[in-house]
């Protein structure tokens, strides 16, 4: 048993991680092309962060929190900022592709590394499927707006059409008219009704989602230079549009709409946590570019922080403009940016926003389709996945097989499935990665000598958490009691039995870990920033509900099964230790 525990916690030193991609015989061709400069990395970060969140989820968040949602963007940025600093230290110390997977291998060991690698694969895949489907919705809406219609059964996934047809049929049987039903239900009904059949199977598929996924995958496949140029162009276009929206919208702001600033109090602002955080999850994708940076130790930390600052500034200003143009309670719509301009009779601007949403989501898809194969590649180098996943194309210098697999993993589900029920797994998966990266910094502080390059790169500023953390937690408890005492009393209630109690488990777990971290901070003089990063991200995870936790843990359990069937037996580190 002791040997087994030693095996699953075996760690790789920074030197070993850096040597792998230079000396590994399983990698064809030569090293990946180092072509990314600081501006390219910042562009990648902005491409990943400013996407579907700013064009859709910001509306519901504003409707719940009012103008005060601008504070939520700042709070979430600070929470991400703690994580970004920890990412920056790892990226500077270990400039190797693999993101949180690689960092976990250096700090926690192989089993945790596999878990976070498996988690990242889920996060990237589900996130990209959701983005591809959203891109398709915006794209078909723009085509319809200019008079180019496509059959409904070619613009919708099979599952949505089937469900919509069943629901509409039931309502029609009750005497309701089709024209009285919501537009999306009408489209689903017509898609199923008009779709051709083969052997009784309806041919319904989201062709635009397939098309954009194939195009982006091709760009990623043929090389980093092409991906870089495309990302830079897309980012430039959407930044121009966002600045245009802010500039034009500022002239239509009515400051009376900013009062009350937080109409639903703190609880109303916090309702948008999941939606707002979803808008920030992209900055970690920058770390997957490590082996293609010209100067990763210098530029990766700068790029992460700069991307976060730029995007937060834009988000805050944009949320204030939106809530100033129309009353906050009117913003619960799927296309808030287009809606506010339509409400002030600027339909041309609404059209520009719709087109820019297509550009924005394409750039998000590009960055994540770029990042995921490099995680497959890193896991393959370590023997945890088959060797072919780390094969580098001799001409294009990209992980060609991993890139193709990633394309299939996103394109096929986007064609036939609607994963709206599990898109929150993207947020919970990202937060879990952030928690482990922050925790990894705390572990590496104890073993820093093993990270041979650490002294050359960025380090998280050290602030002793011994007395500061308890004061922060006590202050937050006092604020929570003053402004939301009723919720605290409800949480402590034992009414409702297991059905109610199970929903309290995530927060209960957070409280236990917060107490443990406070004790460790006092006894071990832990660094404050990674501790705050760990706790804030863990708290955000508790906001995602027990259903998401159950699905997330189920996915990790399936991953553990694969690890013990294949990865544990084929681990290169394990073979070297024999």
Image (cartoon, helix red, strand yellow):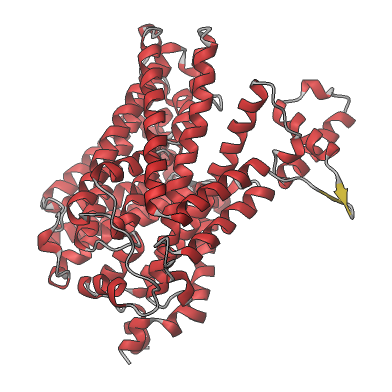
State left or right for residue 218 relative to residue 438: right
* Residue 376 x %, y %: 44, 65
Classify 566 as above or below 14. Answer: below
Based on the displayed image, in which of its 4 quarters is residue 405 positioned?
Answer: bottom right
Query: Which residue is at a point 52% across and 33% down the rendered structure image?
Result: 358
**Going by the image, does 97 lie left or right of 134?**
left
Quadrant placement of the C terminus: bottom left
Which of these two is toward me, 504 or 53?
53
Of 365 and 182, which appears nearest the observer? Answer: 365
* Residue under the point 50% across and 61% down: 553
Relative depth, front residue between 269 and 38: 38
Asked if residue 437 is positioned above or below residue 26 in the image, the reply reads above
Q: x, y (%) of residue 92?
A: 20, 57
Position of residue 309 measured from the top left corner of the image (x, y, whole percent): 26, 35
Counting from the top left corner in percent of width and height, residue 318 is at 37, 22
Residue 417 lies left or right of residue 308; in this view the side is right
**Residue 398 visible within the image:** yes
Asked if residue 500 can be seen in this view, the reply is: no
Asked if residue 31 is positioned above or below residue 432 in the image, the reply reads below
Residue sticking out furthest to the bottom:
578
């Amino acid at each position: 048993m002791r040997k087994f525990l030693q095996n699953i916690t075996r760690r790789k030193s920074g030197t070993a991680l850096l040597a792998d991609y230079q000396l590994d015989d399983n990698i064809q061709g030569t090293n990946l092309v180092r072509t990314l400069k600081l501006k390219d990395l910042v562009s990648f970060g902005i491409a990943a962060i400013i996407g579907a969140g700013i064009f859709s989820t910001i509306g519901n968040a504003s409707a719940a929190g009012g103008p005060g949602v601008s504070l939520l963007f700042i709070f979430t940025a600070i929470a991400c900022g703690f994580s970004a600093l920890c990412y920056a230290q790892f990226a500077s110390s270990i400039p190797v592709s693999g993101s949180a997977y690689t960092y976990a291998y250096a700090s926690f060991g192989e089993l945790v590394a596999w878990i976070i690698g498996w988690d990242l694969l889920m996060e990237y895949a589900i996130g990209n499927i959701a983005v591809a489907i959203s891109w398709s919705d915006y794209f078909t809406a723009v085509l319809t707006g200019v008079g180019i219609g496509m059959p409904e059964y070619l613009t919708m996934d099979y599952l949505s059409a089937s469900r919509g047809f069943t629901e509409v049929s039931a309502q029609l049987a009750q005497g309701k008219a089709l024209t009285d039903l919501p537009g999306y239900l009408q489209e689903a009904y017509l898609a199923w009704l008009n779709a051709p059949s083969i052997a009784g199977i309806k041919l319904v598929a989201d062709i635009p989602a397939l098309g954009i996924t194939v195009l982006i995958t091709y760009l990623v496949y043929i090389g980093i230079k092409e991906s870089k140029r495309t990302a830079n162009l897309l980012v430039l276009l959407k930044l121009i549009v966002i600045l245009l929206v802010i500039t034009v919208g500022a002239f239509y702001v009515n400051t009376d709409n900013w009062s009350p600033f937080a109409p639903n109090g703190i609880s109303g602002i916090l309702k948008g946590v999941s939606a707002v955080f979803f808008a920030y999850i992209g900055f970690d994708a920058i770390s997957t570019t490590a082996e293609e940076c010209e100067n990763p130790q210098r530029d990766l930390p700068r790029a992460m922080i700069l991307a976060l600052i730029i995007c937060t500034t834009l988000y805050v200003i944009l949320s204030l403009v939106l809530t100033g143009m129309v009353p906050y309670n009117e913003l619960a719509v799927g296309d808030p940016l287009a809606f506010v301009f339509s409400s002030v009779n600027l339909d041309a601007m609404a059209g520009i926003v719709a087109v820019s949403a297509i550009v924005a989501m394409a750039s998000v898809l590009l960055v994540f389709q770029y990042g995921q194969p490099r995680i497959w590649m890193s896991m393959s180098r370590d023997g945890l996945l088959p060797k072919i996943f780390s094969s580098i194309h001799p001409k294009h210098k990209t992980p060609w097989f991993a890139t193709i697999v990633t394309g299939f993993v996103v394109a096929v589900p986007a064609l036939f499935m609607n994963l709206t029920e599990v898109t929150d797994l993207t947020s919970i998966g990202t937060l879990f990665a952030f928690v482990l990266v922050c925790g990894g910094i705390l572990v590496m502080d104890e073993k820093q000598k093993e990270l041979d390059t650490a002294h050359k790169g960025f380090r998280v500023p050290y602030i002793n958490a011994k007395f500061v953390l308890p004061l922060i937690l006590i202050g937050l408890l006092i604020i929570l009691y003053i402004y939301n005492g009723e919720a605290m009393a409800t949480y402590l209630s034992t009414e409702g039995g297991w059905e109610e109690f199970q929903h309290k488990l995530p927060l209960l777990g957070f409280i236990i870990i917060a107490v443990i971290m406070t004790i460790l901070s006092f006894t071990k003089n832990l660094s404050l920033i990674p501790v705050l990063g760990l706790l804030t991200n863990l708290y955000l995870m508790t906001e995602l509900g027990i259903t998401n936790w159950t699905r997330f843990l189920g996915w990790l359990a399936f991953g553990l099964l694969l690890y013990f069937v294949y990865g544990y037996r084929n681990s290169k580190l394990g073979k070297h230790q024999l």
